[in-house]
């Protein structure tokens, strides 16, 4: 089985913020989940580097566009390294190979009659890199970001988007392509309201891929950027890889870029006679101070603070646990701290401390051998089924809730059996069962908080590879296992 997952390509006009880390951590969690099922996974992310917006940002910083792109794409890569993002490829739209693919696709579409030359008269929002309809022409403001827009009147090549209206309507209605489900109507209504052909070349934008024709045009940045999902896995130059992974299984995006992904993108694929992605999931926004986070509003929360103050894994955990994936959520330190102290410190870290402490005191650090309470395995089995279902449905928070049933069970089990009391009985059985319960937790939580799981595995005397496959949660070890060292994984924050 294969699993191809993508994130949007982030613009290089600004450094990564919490919103970018959100989509990327979510994609990473899915990629890790499917790798643990031993599927052949390809995880693509990268940066979107052309267009007016980047050009202007570079001018403001006194750099050339490629200098800015080099600098910011490096910052994205470093951030992903810090956050343990296990991408298979980081694509930059300024790469030669990607540019060649975009040019070839342009030519193919031109030859197929999917493109035609016309005149574009209308408005353009540089911030959204989007052609926009303006209600009040005396005050030309972008309907989405509310910034002033510029008027354009120029010849251009158009893509016949309108031709796909009925086909798209049927596809959206009858497939899983628009996710979550509650977004379907919104997209359908937009399609039904009428699609117009879109201009995909620009005359006066210098920072873009040159159109492969005898006139001087650059290619519209969204046409260029969307095609990364094809060029990133070898379309038109490595057919074997492309055949292996296309169509994409899950494409993650924020709800801000749904129209590009749920309408223009499938139409381009239809025009190229390519199969459509299985799911394009639009998640909600992190809000800060009641508004969507963005650099220009000055309400951007930097991931660095949370990584330094709490650690990478608590940050990953919070992003995926706090809010159901399709919904918006307020990002605040207060909420973060609450979640951190209750789930990671009280429930998880305390379970580890109490258990390892006992094993050390009562058994000299050796995991006792003997009978295991079968409920641990029965429960793990059931949890794994539900957890898998939920994660396959891209419901991260709900899937963690399932895993947490085991955390709660183990804490309760420990309380009930009270192996620290003088007169407790079944101490061996209790502790060996707790050990296997913890082992299974590490397996289940591995896609979410990989660094922590690896560290705890090492602490309890296991190898990293033993928690890297879901199959392993059924295994019972033979031979003695000794705890290696003990440390407090998560410290309470005041
Ligand atoms: O749109 N909350 O790039 P971009 C949640 N280059 N997610 C957020 C967010 C927030 N407040 N802010 C940003 C582009 N995101 C194009 C994409 S794809 C071919 C081209 C995330 O840098 C979310 O995934 O503006 C959103 O869709 C993406 O960052 C936009 O990143």
Image (cartoon, rainbow, N blue to C red):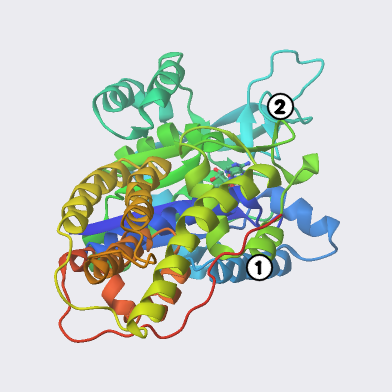
10 Å neighbourhood of mark 1: few (<14), some, or many (≥20)? some
Residue drawn at x 42%, y 60% is 44
> Whole-Å distance between the Cαs marked 1 and 2?
30 Å
Q: Position of residue 445 (x, y in %)?
A: 37, 59
Q: Which residue is mark 1?
A: 75
Q: Secondary structure at mark 1?
A: helix
Q: Quadrant of residue 472?
A: bottom left
Q: Position of residue 229 (x, y in %)?
A: 40, 54
Residue drawn at x 24%, y 72% is 428
In the image, the residue with mark 1 has its CB under 8 Å from the nearest atom of ligand 1: no
User: From what the image shows, is residue 214 above or below residue 431?
Assistant: above
User: From what the image shows, is residue 257 above or below residue 108?
Assistant: above
Q: Which residue is mark 2?
A: 142
Q: Quadrant of ligand 1?
A: top right
Q: Position of residue 254 (x, y in %)?
A: 52, 40
Side (left or right) of 223 relative to 30: right
1 and 2 marks in contact (CB < 8 Å): no
Residue 301 versus residue 429: which sits nearer the camera? 429
- Position of the N terminus, as image quadrant, is bottom left
């Amino acid at each position: 089985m294969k699993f191809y997952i993508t994130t949007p390509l982030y613009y290089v006009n600004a450094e990564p913020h919490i919103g970018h880390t959100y989509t990327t951590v979510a994609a990473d969690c899915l990629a890790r989940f499917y790798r643990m099922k031993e599927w052949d996974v390809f995880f693509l992310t990268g940066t979107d580097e052309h267009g007016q917006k980047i050009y202007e940002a570079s001018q403001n910083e006194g750099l050339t566009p490629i200098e800015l792109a080099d600098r910011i794409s490096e910052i994205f890569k470093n951030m992903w390294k810090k956050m343990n993002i296990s991408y298979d490829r980081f694509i930059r739209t300024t790469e030669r190979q990607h540019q060649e693919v975009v040019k070839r696709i342009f030519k193919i579409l031109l030859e197929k009659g999917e493109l035609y030359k016309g005149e574009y008269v209308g408005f353009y929002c540089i911030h959204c890199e989007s052609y926009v309809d303006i209600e009040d022409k005396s005050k030309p403001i972008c309907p989405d970001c509310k910034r002033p827009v510029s008027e354009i009147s120029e010849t251009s090549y158009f893509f016949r988007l309108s031709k796909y209206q009925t086909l798209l309507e049927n596809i959206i209605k009858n497939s899983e392509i628009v996710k979550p489900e509650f977004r379907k109507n919104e997209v359908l209504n937009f399609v039904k309201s009428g699609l117009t052909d879109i201009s995909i070349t620009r005359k006066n934008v210098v920072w873009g891929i040159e159109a492969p024709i005898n006139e001087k045009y650059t290619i519209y940045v969204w046409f260029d950027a969307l095609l990364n999902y094809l060029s990133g896995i070898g379309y038109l130059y490595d057919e074997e890889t492309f055949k292996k992974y296309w169509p994409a299984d899950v494409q993650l995006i924020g709800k801000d870029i749904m129209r590009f992904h749920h309408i223009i993108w499938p139409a381009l694929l239809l025009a190229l006679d390519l199969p459509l992605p299985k799911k394009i999931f639009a998640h909600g926004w992190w809000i800060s101070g009641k508004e969507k986070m963005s650099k220009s509003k000055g309400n951007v929360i930097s991931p660095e603070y949370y990584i330094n103050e709490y650690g990478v894994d608590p940050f990953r955990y919070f992003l995926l646990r706090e809010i159901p994936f399709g919904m918006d959520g307020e990002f605040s330190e207060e909420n973060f701290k609450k979640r951190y102290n209750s789930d990671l410190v009280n429930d998880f870290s305390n379970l580890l401390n109490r258990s390892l402490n006992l094993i050390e005191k009562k058994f000299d650090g050796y995991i006792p051998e003997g009978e295991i309470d079968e409920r641990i395995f029965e429960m793990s089995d059931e949890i794994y089924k539900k957890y898998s279902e939920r994660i396959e449905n891209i419901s991260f928070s709900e899937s963690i809730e399932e895993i947490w049933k085991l955390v709660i069970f183990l804490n309760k089990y420990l309380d009930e059996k009270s192996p620290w009391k003088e007169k407790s009985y079944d101490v061996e059985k209790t502790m060996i069962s707790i050990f296997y319960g913890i082992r299974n937790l590490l397996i289940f939580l591995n896609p979410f908080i990989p660094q922590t799981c690896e560290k705890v595995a090492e602490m309890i005397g296991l190898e990293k590879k033993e928690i890297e496959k879901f199959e392993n949660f059924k295994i019972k070890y033979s031979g003695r296992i000794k705890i290696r060292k003990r440390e407090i994984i998560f410290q309470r924050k005041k």
